[in-house]
Structure formats: C-alpha cells, structure tokens
Amino acid sequence: MVKEGRIPDEDLLFYLTPSEMLELIDTRNPRLIVRAMNRMKNACQAAKDIHPEHVARPPFIPINRKAISGPLSGARSMKGTPVSKGRVIAPARVITRLEDAHLIQKGDVLITYATDIGWSPYFPLISGIVTELGGLISHGAVVAREYGLPSIVGCHGATQMFRSGEEVLLDGNLGVISTTQREPN
C-alpha cells in the first residue's frame, strides 16, 4: 500500500480496521489516513500514560515507586517486578523513543517505557532491560528471558530517575535497579 501511494507509512496498517483497509483500496480516501494517524498518535500517548490501578487485579497494594534506600549510601534505587533473573553492573541507556535506539551501546542496561517487536534488533547489544510498563508476558520480559538478560518491569518513573551513562546495578532476582555512584563518562 505504501508503494502504491495509498498510505504514507506501513505502520498505519495496524491502525486501520479491515473494512477501512478495503475502503482504502477502493477509494484512496484521505479521511481514513487521518483517522489511522490519530489512532497511532493516541496509542503512543496511551503507552506513556501509566494507570496501574486500572490493570492490577484486586486486591491492589500500591508499591511506593519513589526512590528507596539503595545498597550504597546516596544511591538512587527503584523496585519493580522481576521478570528475568540475573545481575549486572553496566552503564544505563535511557531511551524513550525507538527512533533514538541507535544510541544504545554494547553492554548498556536499557531503560525505557516499554518495548515491542521494533526493539528486537537491540537486545543482542544490551546487558539488561528495565521498563516502566509490562508484565511477565510483555515483549521485553519474554525476549529478555530468551537472551538470558536480567530484567524488571513496572518501574514507573525510571526514565526520569536514571540518566544515560551513569553506572547502575540491575538485579533481576530482587527486581531492583540502583545507581552505583559512578558518574557518566
């Protein structure tokens, strides 16, 4: 459809209903493109908005996601849900958009909102992954287990708490990520 000029981006296909796809083939209606682009924009925004109280099973016991005392004095630390075991000390790489994934260096601990299939080529480069969204069967968790990478999910605010380049300890056994107090290079 992209080659035929019917849609500007192949990703828009995921935001069209089957009937809209058929209509687009017959009519090239620009209204359908606008509708799909709005859905894509809303889906991206929704991935950034975190409402754990709507997705947790009762009884829901909120976890304080603010900094907790870490293993080192003055360290910043955050607890999430462990989804892949292991422990690593490595530089953090905070990436909030897939378009910036080219900044990932070999051995980095990736800290992001969530992952999907588009992130897959970067998993061989990283040494661990922390996501703000996700669960045991989310994309990042499953792929982390396949690669044997330590991983934790549900770390709301991790992309704001940690900085790219600073050394972090990711403990996938305990579900904790913390700084080690070494400054970025």
Image (cartoon, grey):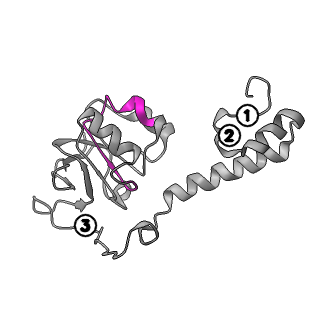
Say what secondary structure mark 1 lies in. Answer: loop
x%, y% of residue 103? 40, 34
- Residue under label 1: 8
Residue at x-position 39% and y-position 68%: 56
x%, y% of residue 168? 21, 48
| Gap between marks 1 and 3 measured at Cα | 43 Å
* Disc assigned to residue 12: 2
Q: Quadrant of the N terminus?
A: top right
Asked where in the image residue 157 lies, by quadrant, the reply is bottom left
- Specify the amino acid type for callout 2: Leu
Residue at x-position 37% and y-position 58%: 160
- Residue under label 3: 67
Residue at x-position 14% and y-position 62%: 70
x%, y% of residue 164? 32, 45
For label 3, count other residues whose C-alpha is less than 10 Å away and answer few (under 14), some (14-19) or many (20+).
Answer: some
Residue 178 vs residue 31: left or right? Answer: left
Residue at the extreme top: 3
- Judge whether 4 appears above or below 156 on screen: above
Say what secondary structure mark 3 lies in. Answer: loop
Magenta range is: 119-134
Say what secondary structure mark 2 lies in. Answer: helix
Is residue 23 one of those drawn in magenta?
A: no
Asked where in the image residue 133 lies, by quadrant, the reply is bottom left
| Gap between marks 1 and 2 measured at Cα | 8 Å
Q: Are marks 1 and 3 in contact (CB under 8 Å)?
A: no
Nearer mark to the viewer, of 1 and 2: 2
- Judge whether 85 appears above or below 132 on screen: above
Q: Are marks 1 and 2 in contact (CB under 8 Å)?
A: yes
